[in-house]
Image (cartoon, helix red, strand yellow):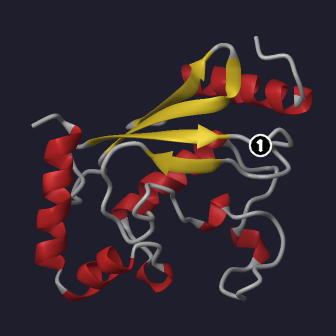
């Protein structure tokens, strides 16, 4: 078991892992990559039904800070992902993963941002919802945002190719 630093965080992560293991939301699995380090998790998300992502299997990592749950983890897709709210390097841009407090850009209210009452389950459910319903007003991937807004047919075709890649096809 990982011993150095973050004992409060470690206890919280162990509790959340236990809960997710027993009651994982449909289409989502997540847990530590290694029992030696509870601060690095892998998540597997199934593409939401009735979206161009349907049928895909998407992997991501969650990296938790030592002061979790005071601050949010970072989430990064480790597979190809073309989405308005995912940077080209795979990092997820969603309000719930932004540090607590007021938004310096005045785009989000503090209630939309991270707070210690959030959980890994809530993050993953928010990401699943984000995949299904992109927020093109706050695009992390400008090309995906523009295509999603202006040429949905082309966007869907690009995403469907990513779905095939996620399945190894």
Which element carries disc 1, helix, strand or loop?
Answer: loop
Side of 6 relative to 147 (left or right): right
Which residue is at a point 73% across and 50% down the rendered structure image? 118
Q: Which residue is mark 1?
A: 65
Side of 134 relative to 147 (left or right): right
* Vertical arrangement, residue 18 with respect to residue 28, above or below: above
Res 142 quadrant in image: bottom left
Residue 158 spot, x, y in % from top left = 16, 64
* Vertical arrangement, residue 137 with respect to residue 40, above or below: below
Residue 67 spot, x, y in % from top left = 86, 43
Residue 50 spot, x, y in % from top left = 21, 57
* Vertical arrangement, residue 143 with respect to residue 25, above or below: below
Position of the N terminus by quadrant: top right
- As rendered, which of 66 and 8 lies closer to the eye? 66
Res 131 quadrant in image: bottom left
Which residue is at a point 40% across and 73% down the rendered structure image? 141
Q: Residue furthest front?
A: 89
Which residue is at a point 41% across and 42% down the rendered structure image? 78
- As rendered, which of 24 and 2 lies closer to the eye? 2
- Regarding residue 24, the answer to whether it shows in the image is no
Count numbered badges in the picture: 1
Position of the C terminus by quadrant: top left
- As rendered, which of 1 and 22 lies closer to the eye? 1
Which residue is at a point 83% across and 24% down the rendered structure image? 11
- Regarding residue 98, the answer to whether it shows in the image is yes
């Amino acid at each position: 078991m990982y011993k150095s630093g973050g004992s409060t965080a470690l206890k919280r992560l162990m509790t959340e892992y236990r809960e997710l293991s027993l009651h994982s939301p449909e289409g989502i699995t997540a847990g530590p990559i290694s029992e030696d380090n509870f601060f690095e998790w892998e998540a597997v998300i199934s593409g939401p039904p009735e979206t161009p992502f349907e049928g895909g299997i998407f992997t991501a990592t969650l990296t938790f800070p030592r002061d979790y749950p005071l601050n949010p983890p970072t989430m990064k897709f480790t597979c190809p992902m073309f989405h308005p709210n995912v940077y080209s390097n795979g990092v997820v841009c969603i309000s719930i993963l932004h540090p607590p407090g007021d938004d310096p850009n005045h785009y989000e209210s503090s209630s939309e941002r991270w707070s210690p009452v959030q959980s890994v389950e809530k993050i993953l459910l928010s990401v699943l919802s984000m995949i299904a319903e992109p927020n093109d007003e706050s695009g992390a991937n400008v090309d995906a945002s523009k295509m999603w807004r202006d040429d949905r047919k082309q966007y869907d075709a690009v995403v469907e190719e990513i779905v095939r890649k996620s399945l190894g096809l």
